Image (spheres, helix red, strand yellow):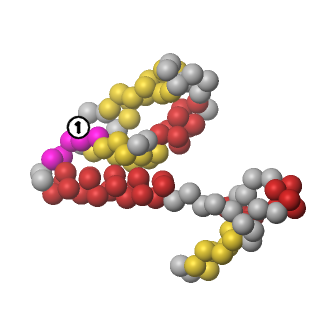
Amino acid sequence: MRAGERARGRATWAADVVRDGTVVVTRRSLVIDVGAVGKGYLVDVVSDILRGAGIERFVVDGGGDLRHEGGRAARIGLEHPLDPRLVAGVADLKGFNDALDRIKAEAAR
């Protein structure tokens, strides 16, 4: 990354990335972390396998990407934003399919 690019600050999707169909073009040098895509896909695959085996009630946790199906709500602890060893609260969630980061952020509002 050049000094001028570094001075512009952290890259953002809206300002630094252009999508043209299936092609992604960046306006400057940057790193795109596609790890979340892989984790989400893993959760989808495992969920499909469980459904295919006739299992109707499950929670799949793919490193923070979650899917819950069937039955009662699942009680989860919400990580304290300043100390990950603490629980800031609990939430009963049913039928969710989301990333924990988003769940924690929405619960903190």
Question: From where the camera sits, is residue 95 visible?
Answer: no
Q: Is residue 17 left or right of residue 105?
A: right
Label 1 secondary element: loop
Question: Which region is colored magenta?
Answer: 55-59
Q: Residues within 10 Å of mark 1 (few under 14, many from 20)?
A: few
Q: How many marks?
A: 1
Determine whether 22 is above or below 74 in the image: below
Q: Is residue 56 magenta?
A: yes
The foreground one among 49 and 5 is 5
**Image quadrant occupied by the C terminus:** top right
Principal SS element in the magenta part?
A: loop
The foreground one among 6 and 81 is 6
Q: Is residue 8 left or right of residue 102?
A: right
- Where does the image place residue 81, in percent across and percent down from the top left? 59, 27
Q: Residue furthest front?
A: 2
Q: Quadrant of residue 90?
A: top left
What residue would you read off at disc 1? 71
- Where does the image place residue 73, in percent across and percent down from the top left? 31, 33
- Where does the image place residue 14, in percent across and percent down from the top left? 71, 63
The residue lying at 41 percent from left, 53 percent from top is 39
**Image quadrant occupied by the N terminus:** bottom right
Q: Quadrant of residue 26?
A: bottom right
Q: Quadrant of residue 83?
A: top right
Give the residue type at disc 1: Gly
The foreground one among 6 and 27 is 6
